[in-house]
Amino acid sequence: MTNISSIEQVAALLQVIGQESRLQILLAIGEGETCVCHLEAMLGLRQATLSQHLMALREAGVVTDRRAGRYIHYRLRDPALLGLVRQAAQLQGLELPSLAPSPDCDCPNCCERKNA
């Protein structure tokens, strides 16, 4: 017998991450940690729009956040989710873009990556 509750939970997760902007956010975060200002500069989303997407991802348990001074950094709760996104692209014969630190972001996290 199929557990409807678990099917509903998977459907809800896919619905939350299924929007183009949210997939871009997940790819930009990657397996590490990314600050909001980096996401803004990288994705070209307004801060209010980005905040709404991040709130939905946080409420769904997809991302976690931490504050470091005036910067908020996000990370995937389970980086295995990237594998799911990559497999979905692979099933369609697509290659996902590589999202690198933005030259427009001057937070300590991005500056550290640019100088490495």
Image (cartoon, rainbow, N blue to C red):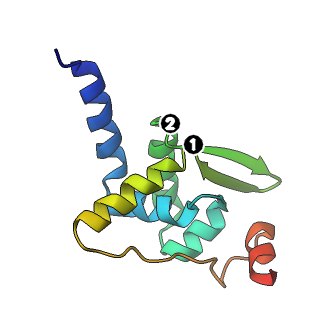
Helix, strand or loop at mark 1? loop
Q: CA distance from mark 2 to mark 1?
A: 7 Å
Q: Relative to the observer, which residue lies in front, 48 or 98?
A: 98
Asked where in the image residue 111 lies, by quadrant, the reply is: bottom right
Three-letter code for the amino acid on which mark 2 is drawn = Gly
Residue at horizontal 62%, vertical 51%?
75
- x, y percent for residue 72: 70, 53
Q: How many marks?
A: 2
- Is residue 79 depicted above or below 41 in this figure? above
Three-letter code for the amino acid on which mark 1 is drawn = Arg
- x, y percent for residue 23: 40, 60
Do the residues under discs 2 and 1 have CB atoms within 8 angstroms? yes
Residue at horizontal 66%, vertical 85%?
103
> Is residue 52 visible in the rendered structure shown here?
no
Helix, strand or loop at mark 2? loop
Q: Which residue is mark 1?
A: 77
- Is residue 10 depicted above or below 25 in this figure? above
Quarter of the N terminus within the rendering: top left
Callout in the foreground (2, 1): 1
Mark 1: few/some/many CA within 10 Å (<14, 14-19, 20+): some
Q: Which residue is mark 2?
A: 61
- x, y percent for residue 89: 30, 66
Asked where in the image residue 4 lies, by quadrant, the reply is: top left
Which residue occupies the extreme top position in the image? 1
Q: Relative to the observer, which residue lies in front, 8 or 16?
A: 8
Asked where in the image residue 77 lies, by quadrant, the reply is: top right
Mark 2: few/some/many CA within 10 Å (<14, 14-19, 20+): few
Residue at horizontal 55%, vertical 75%?
42
